[in-house]
Amino acid sequence: MKTNDHCQETLKQRGLVMPHIAMVYDTVSGSTADMGAIIQDVLRQESTVTTLPVDTRDSLEPYDAVVIGSPMRFGWCTAKVRAFLKRHRSHLARKKVALFFSMLYVVRIAEEPVDEARLFFDPGLAIATIPRKTATGMDKTHSLGFFQRRRCQNAPAIDPVSIAYFKGRLLLDRLPFATRLFMKIVTMATTKEQVGEFLNPEAVRNWAKQLACRL
């Protein structure tokens, strides 16, 4: 029996009320929003899901869990998501929280300790493990350890039940001018981030099925 089918049957057998989940995300080129839509579709099979704007000031008290998505920007989430986390930190500290990030490149540096038990990786990211001595500046700011440190520094009160890293998309014509110019320079300077459509809906669905049981 599939995981989400098993969870759904268990809920029915126990007569439990379906959890109410808040979904909040920011998006730049649309890939994080597309991921959010897929996750919602899966979670709604056994939960009530309400999408909230990232700038919401409404209380999170009515929700049993919160799923938060963001493009990865310089090792952490966007300014809007950072503001959301800060604004609602007291409620989020008491809720089940899951995070998902859209990105193009991530690496594992062997010497960096990472709590990987709660992590989900999109196979499309093809995460390599490298020694610190060979890591470039870009590797050091795109490593699992770096992402973990930034999360702990910026959202210390939140203890996520799961964190997903998905490969997204880079379509320059969808980006604001300044971001487009910056990413054009990046893609000219390195092959680690390239223009293209990389979103894998099946990977997003697989994580959402796992998440359904954790929430």
Image (cartoon, rainbow, N blue to C red):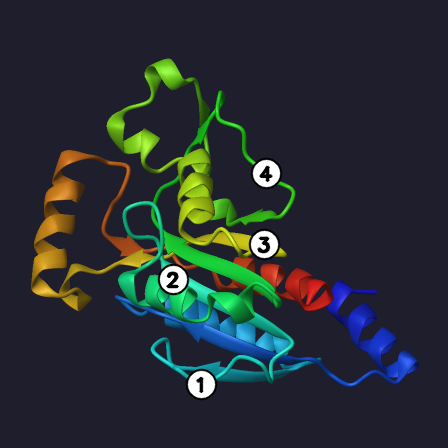
Q: Amino acid under label 2?
A: Ser
* Apparent side of residue 89 relative to residue 102 in the rendered image (left or right): right
| Residue tagged 1 | 58
Q: Amino acid under label 1?
A: Asp
Q: Nearer the viewer, mark 1 or mark 4?
A: 1
Q: Nearer the viewer, mark 2 or mark 3?
A: 3
Do residues under tags 1 and 2 come within 8 Å of each other at their CB atoms? no
Position in image of residue 92 (x %, y %): 54, 67
| Residue tagged 4 | 115
Numbered-mark total: 4
Q: Which residue is drawn at the image coordinates 68% and 60% (left, top)?
A: 210
Q: Amino acid under label 4?
A: Asp
| Residue tagged 3 | 159
Q: Amino acid under label 3?
A: Asp
Counting residues from the N terminus, which is met first, the one under dot 1 or under dot 2?
1
Q: Which residue is drawn at the image coordinates 52% and 67% (left, top)?
A: 90
- Near mark 4 (Cα within 10 A), the count class, few <14, some 14-19 or many ≥20, is few
Image quadrant for the C terminus?
Answer: bottom right
Counting residues from the N terminus, which is met first, the one under dot 3 or under dot 1?
1
Q: Quadrant of residue 64?
A: bottom right
Q: Nearer the viewer, mark 4 or mark 3?
A: 3
Counting residues from the N terminus, which is met first, the one under dot 4 or under dot 3?
4
Counting residues from the N terminus, which is met first, the one under dot 1 or under dot 4?
1
Q: Quadrant of residue 20?
A: bottom right
Q: What is the CA distance from the residue labelled 3 to the residue labelled 1?
A: 21 Å
Q: Nearer the viewer, mark 1 or mark 2?
A: 1
Image quadrant for the N terminus?
Answer: bottom right
- Near mark 3 (Cα within 10 A), the count class, few <14, some 14-19 or many ≥20, is some
Tell me: residue 155, above or below residue 63.
above
Check residue 70 in the rendering and tell me which mark sits there, or answer none. 2
